[in-house]
Image (tube, rainbow, N blue to C red):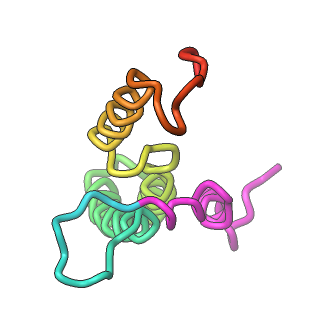
Amino acid sequence: MAEDPGRPNYTQDADRIIFSASFRRLANKTQVHPLYANGHLRHRMIHSSEVASVGRNLGMQVGHWLEEQNEIQPGEAHRVAGNIHAAALAHDIGNPPFGHSGEATIGAWFKARFEKSEGLFKGVDEAL
């Protein structure tokens, strides 16, 4: 099927990402942050939206440069920007809370409790 010029593929991709359950779950994952003096923590959905905005703007600049260098057709800079925007929206989907250091910390916390085999962890199969 031919691409709809009024709604290019990269726009459809970005919409699919934004409306996906995976993207919405980013609102429940805290972005790595310093200790704030207030309770307004940043979550991954905000972070991904900001990264996508920066990526789209940089992509537009690169796209214009590519047009000037005759590397892409005139008027195609928006495709570069749109594809980067969609990719940046999705870049954190599937990552653990607090990044890889958070994953390691959470894993070490559970390992220590399973090794003690007491309280809630008593009798839990080691394979679990």
Q: Main secondary structure of the magenta part?
A: helix
The residue that appears at 39% across and 21% down in the rendered structure is 115
The stretch drawn in magenta includes residue 2: yes
Q: Position of residue 75 (x, y in %)?
A: 46, 66
User: Quadrant location of residue 18?
Assistant: bottom right
Closer to the camera, 87 or 82?
Answer: 87
- Examine the rendering and report whether any part of residue 74 can be seen: no
Camera sees residue 109: yes
Where's the C terminus, which quadrant?
top right
Q: Residue at x 73, y 57 (%)?
A: 3
Outermost residue toward the bottom in this view: 38
Please give the name of the residue rendered at 67% of the width and 60% of the height, measured from the top-left corner.
Answer: 20
Q: Is residue 118 above or below residue 53?
A: above
Is 128 above or below relative to 1?
A: above
Left or right, residue 92 beside residue 102: right
- Identified at 67% across, 59% down, the residue is 21
Could you tell me residue 116's position as x and y percent? 39, 25
- Residue 91 x, y percent position in the rendering: 44, 49
As drawn, 92 above or below 25 = above
- How many numbered tags mark residues here? 0
Closer-to-camera residue (6/104) = 104
Specify whether residue 52 is painted magenta: no
Give the side of residue 41 with respect to residue 1, left or right. left
Q: Which residues are magenta?
A: 1-29
* Residue at the extreme right of the image, as rendered: 1
Image side of residue 27 versus residue 124, left or right: left
**36 or 94: which is nearer to us?**
36
Q: Is residue 28 left or right of residue 102?
A: right
Location of residue 16 in the rendering, given as x and y in whole percent from the top left corner: 67, 60
Front position in the image: 59 or 28: 28
